[in-house]
Image: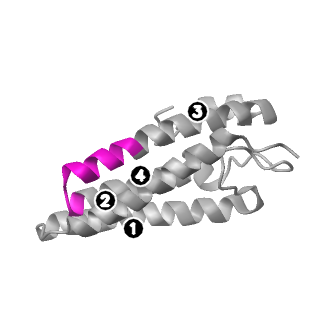
């Protein structure tokens, strides 16, 4: 069984701290935005939630809270994973930026940017391990966007 590294737990802890901070700031800064922005933000956030749920269902037994791949896992390249390599991160970013459209504040913007930076670092770390574990991962990387479609 592959040992989970301290770095895995550190990255996940930062992720949850940022998500909790985002929720607190979102709640504290709630204001009345115009209806168009509110609808756009809700649609973006709802899309993000759907992306996360679809990715979790697609991963099935390969799902893990930490970046280290599951010991007896398989490389998932179908469904939403044929569009982006890290759809859970993509979905969370959509939720965060949708919330930012609803209730803009520099604090929320800072947290959303921090989440993007964290997911860029975390996904690169994860991809090094996936490349070692799965022979087809390097080809998959060339064909599929990392966090957003068409952006490798």
Q: Distance between the residues labelled 1 and 3?
A: 26 Å
Disc 4 target residue: 93
Marks 2 and 3: which is nearer the front? 3
Tell me what residue is drawn at x 27 percent, y 69 percent. 27
* Relative horizontal placement of residue 21, taking residue 101 as reference (left or right): right
Residue at point 15% right, 66% down?
Answer: 36
Please give the residue where the numbered disc 3 appears in the rendered image: 124
Mark 1 touches mark 2? (CB < 8 Å): yes
Q: In this view, does 151 lie to the left or right of 136?
A: left
Q: Can you say whether 132 is above or below 110 in the image?
A: above
- The magenta-colored residue range is 101-114
Q: Mark 2 points at which residue?
A: 98
* Percent x, y of residue 138: 69, 28
- Dot 2 or dot 3, earlier in sequence: 2
- Which of disc 4 and disc 1 is earlier in sequence? 1
105 inside magenta stretch: yes
Q: How crowded is mark 1: few (under 14 residues within 10 Å), some or many (20 or more)?
A: some
Q: Identify whether 137 is placed above or below 75.
A: above
Disc 1 marks which residue? 46
From mark 1 to mark 4, how far is it between C-alphas? 11 Å
- State yes or no: discs 2 and 4 in contact (Cβ < 8 Å): no
Q: Name which residue lies at 66% across and 50% down.
A: 66
Question: Separation of disc 1 and disc 2 at Cα?
Answer: 8 Å
**2 or 4: tag closer to the N-terminus:** 4
């Amino acid at each position: 069984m592959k040992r989970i590294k301290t770095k895995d737990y550190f990255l996940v802890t930062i992720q949850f701290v940022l998500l909790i901070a985002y929720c607190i700031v979102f709640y504290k800064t709630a204001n009345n935005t115009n209806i168009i922005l509110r609808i756009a933000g809700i649609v973006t956030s709802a899309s993000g939630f759907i992306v996360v749920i679809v990715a979790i269902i697609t991963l099935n037994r390969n799902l893990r809270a930490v970046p280290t791949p599951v010991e007896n896992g398989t490389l998932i390249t179908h469904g939403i994973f044929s569009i982006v390599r890290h759809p859970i991160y993509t979905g969370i970013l959509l939720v965060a930026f949708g919330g930012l459209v609803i209730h803009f504040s520099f604090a929320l913007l800072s947290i959303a940017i921090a989440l993007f930076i964290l997911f860029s670092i975390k996904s690169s770390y994860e991809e090094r391990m996936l490349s070692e574990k799965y022979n087809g991962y390097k080809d998959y990387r060339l064909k599929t966007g990392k966090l957003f479609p068409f952006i490798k």
